[in-house]
Image (cartoon, rainbow, N blue to C red):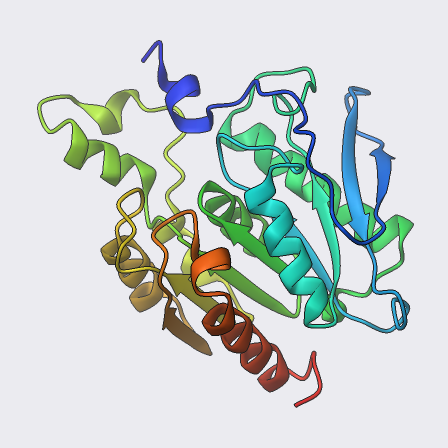
Amino acid sequence: MTQETRLVFAAGRPLAQSRPVEPFQQVELSRPDGARQFAWIMRQSANAETAPWVLFLHGNAATIASRVNIVRYEHLRTLGLNVFAPEYRGFAGLAGTPTESTVTEDAHNGYRYLRETLRVPAERIVIYGWSLGSAIAVNVASTVGAAALILEGAPASLVAIGEREYPWMPIRLVMRNPFESIRKIDRITVPTLFLHSPEDTVIPIAEGRTLFDAAPGRKRFVEVRGGHIDPADVDAATMLEAIRAFLSEAALLAS
């Protein structure tokens, strides 16, 4: 119980030194409690005004400047997408303690910036969550409008994973951040793409399959190589083609 925040979020790292190759902009977000929050904007160079936007929600043990996230931003821009990546409280030097509710609110705050400040219509927004960020993405996508949802390395339920890891402990009774996407996925009304590696030892692919099976509506499951961390490096071609085809079917990218 005392170590849950550290185990689930692994926050506290400073903003990493890595930066995108292409130009980017760091913007300050207005948060209801007045605390500081920032995000990165990475626009298309040619057609930024008409290109779809990706709200990118990263996972634990990272910041928006971690190389593993930057690789994904650059892939998404290669496909012709604008990228917006908000940071969470407790990460990258921001004040506060992350919890499921607070990081979800921070992700919502990023969504509001897209809608209200950048004036991006919901039908041009793709919500993308990787790892723990995919559980945050489900929380957000279950309550707001969007065009599509992409979940990479998604857990169906962190509390269920905890129960398997510690079968002798009453995890469900004491865990404060259960991240039970399996209980919310039926509220998703947009096309959903699941990306997961059979080699993933952090979030086993069975978790992704369970969540996929419970998801309603239009959905697709694509297996990628590279385990939990490295598909964007090891199997970039498969990832990019899966995302391109998925967004083309959703009429967000040209075929």
Residue 151 is situated, as x and y percent measured from the top left of the image, at 48, 58
- Residue shown at the point (30%, 42%) measured from the top left: 202
Left or right? Give the position of 107 relative to 230: right
User: Which quadrant holds the N terminus?
Assistant: top left
The image position of residue 185, as x and y in percent, is: 42, 58
Q: Residue at x 24, y 39 (%)?
A: 160
Residue 120 in view here? yes
**On the picture, is 25 further left or further right than 254?**
right
Is residue 59 shown left or right of residue 223? right
Residue 155: x and y in percent read 35, 48
**The quadrant where residue 52 appears:** bottom right
Does residue 191 appear in this view? no
Q: Nearer the viewer, residue 24 or 3?
A: 24
Vertical order, 228 against 224 (above or below): above
Q: Report the residue at 46% width, 27% height from top.
A: 9
Q: Point out the residue furthest to the top here.
A: 2
* Residue farthest along the bottom direction in this orientation: 255
Quarter residue 85 falls in? top right
Residue at point 43%, 60% (across, down): 234
Q: Quadrant of the C terminus?
A: bottom right
Query: What x and y, as percent, mark residue 216?
Result: 41, 71
Which residue lies most toward the left here?
168
In the depicted structure, whether residue 250 falls above or below residue 207: below
Q: Viewer-proximal residue, 138 or 131?
A: 131
- Quadrant of residue 252 within the rendered picture: bottom right
